[in-house]
Amino acid sequence: MSATAAPPATDLLCINTVRALAMDAVQQADSGHPGTPMALAPLAWVLWQRHLRVDPADPAWPDRDRFVLSCGHACMLMYAALYLTGFDLSLDDLKQFRQWGSRTPGHVEFGVTPGVEATTGPLGQGVGNAVGMAIAEAELAALFNRPGHDIVDHRTYFICSDGDLMEGISHEAASLAGHLKLGKLIGFYDDNHITIDGSTDLAFTDDTARRFESYGWHVQRVTDGNDTQALDAATQAAQAVTDRPSLIIVRTHIAFGSPHKQDSAEAHGAPLGVDEVKLTKQALGWPSLEPFYVPEESLARWRSAKERGARLHADWQRRWDAYRAAFPDLARELERRLAGRLPDGWDSALPTFGAADAQATRAASSKVLNAIAPKLPELIGGSADLTGSNLTYIKGSGDAGAGRWSERNFHFGVREHAMGAVLNGIAYHRGFIPYGGTFLIFSDYMRPAMRLAALAELKTIYVFTHDSIGLGEDGPTHQPIEQLSALRAIPNLVVIRPADPGETVEAWRAAIVHQRGPVALALTRQKLAVIDRAKFGSTAGLQRGGYVLADPPGNPPRVILLATGSEVEIALAAWERLNGEGIATRVVSMPCFEFFAAQPAQYRDEVLPPGIPLRIAIEAAAPDSWYRWVGDRGVVLGIERFGASAPYQRIYKELGLTADHLVAEARRLVQAG
Ligand SMILES: Cc1ncc(C[n+]2csc(CCOP(=O)(O)OP(=O)(O)O)c2C)c(N)n1
Ligand SMILES: [Mg+2]
């Protein structure tokens, strides 16, 4: 650290408070990541003191700046800053770092700590989230601001580390952000030359500045991460650049101030040790060796953020009041959208499908989407370059992008992983119901982001088409097998695989209404008949996850066939034959395991009576997720190999997903007793 770069003494006291708290909390928990918060403490000081427009008294103030700590392991940086600036987080909360039920979990989690805007930890995700937040801001501003009334006008900041920038998702997200010219997005790269394995020389020699410049970002360097003036100046310069996103590369030293651990990978993910903490505090000139000591002078200065935040918020409130007076309808609409309330009558134009409307469920999905879109302006989304296959386009709206932010269709490019994280960012921001489409097989390419959406209980919708071997000729590389079971294994993620165009209507209804977590729709490429609802169970049954579609005439059922999606019509064909030959058979449509599992036991027992153990499930996918529903005497006709290239009817036949096979299995079960 050069002499000229040293912050003023009182600033240094404030900065060192973060360093001391990070060391102490990690030491007390005997686990965590002290080094990076120590290195980034000056940046936190500059940001929270001078730049972040947030109100600690109201973490949900809609026009606040968003801040994402993409390197979620550095969470003590945020916890310290949030406590010090007066968010509803106490010193006791910091003492509970990483303990059961605490508000200071091992990596930052949305909804757990006031002021935390995004759940991060899996590296790279936060960069995508920040891009999504900046998109949401741009879109909301375009829709709701009026001349002289910029009531949506905030920035999105993020901090990322070497690991974030190594991960592919950051490449995708940064490329998209550059393309979209997101001028209010400002990132800081913690260029500390250290990852867990040691020096970044081992595996990372990108020229990050040129990389981001080539994406179309404005790039600056701060050569000394302790130089608060340089950090401040670079932040101001980034704010002044409004036609593209900005990256500020900050050279820092992990565990700054530690005599033995500074610049060492050892400081990344382990306590410094009691002795080293003491030596570091002494080296930093820290006034006390008492753990969690916070000097009054430091706290007072940090807490001035409260007053600053209140002032900024009050100023916005005045502008909001003026806006509300001038544009009462718009104001009400924005309030509705931010609250996540659906407009009355949003579902009044849902289509109905009759016998003549046989079609792929992806095609039915497109009709539903386009029927609800005019009444549900918050619904925005697109596809990862498969718009014409996923059928995700909202007709009557154009392509969103730089200078076209009031449009609703997004082209994410061939960037599934970033798409997932961007959808999360849009959902975190609020004001939208974001959806994204790709082939079901490529859910694998965005699964980490989906998992985080589920963990953070975000409202995002995935439109996954080409949902099985039923896609046919593209072959085994494109045919999902284990994806359905794997997605069903993610807690909080709702997976819906509708059986026909009618169930597709209900699937979208469920997706729009569902709170607290993402919904994945699995849709066919191939045409499906419309199930005759005069003869069979109503589509409304989808809302309970599973329902009796067909029962035997007269007798109670002896055998139950269970199916989802395109295999329901196979089950119905077998049902017809089995009942014809005197084996009383029921068909249960099971479009959504999660909804069904959430039903009262009494309802589940009505649909799947415990006294009927002869059950056969059929689904063109790995069988794993079915065993709970068929029981240990049940059978699953699934797929335990990869698919094949051929017309789909042939693949179904070769893999035994046929009514013949169902009938034979039912006979066998009945004979076995
Ligand atoms: C996707 C993902 N892979 C691996 C990890 C485990 N991990 C946590 S931090 C880290 C790298 C640490 O280096 P860097 O990102 O530069 O952070 P620093 O130590 O400099 O704070 C790794 C591999 C992770 N959190 N997420
Ligand atoms: Mg690093």
Image: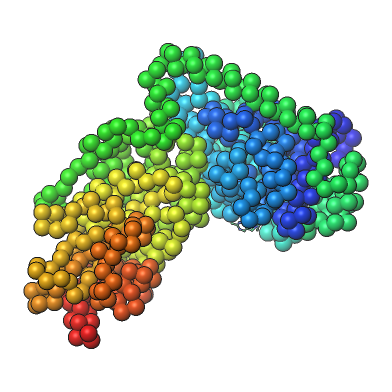
Q: Is residue 553 above or below residue 124?
A: below
Q: Quadrant of ligand 1?
A: bottom right
- Quarter holding the C terminus is bottom left
Query: The N terminus is located in which quarter?
Result: top right
- For image coordinates 20% across by 78% down, the residue present is 666
**Residue 349 rendering spot, x and y as whole percentages:** 22, 37
Q: Quick check: 211 above or below 640?
A: above
Q: Is residue 259 left or right of residue 495?
A: right
Which corner quadrant of the image does residue 335 belong to?
Answer: top left
Q: Quadrant of residue 130?
A: top right
Q: Could you tell me residue 574's position as x and y percent?
A: 16, 71
Which of 440 and 305 lies nearest the eye of the viewer? 305
At x 73%, y 26%, the residue is 304
Residue sitting farthest toward the front: 602
Rendered location of residue 312, percent (x, y): 62, 22
Residue in front for this viewpoint, 309 or 215 = 309
Q: Residue at x 27, y 33 (%)?
A: 345
438 or 542: nearer the viewer: 542
Residue 235: quarter of image: top right
> Vertically, is 21 above or below 563?
above
The x and y percentages for residue 502 are 20, 51
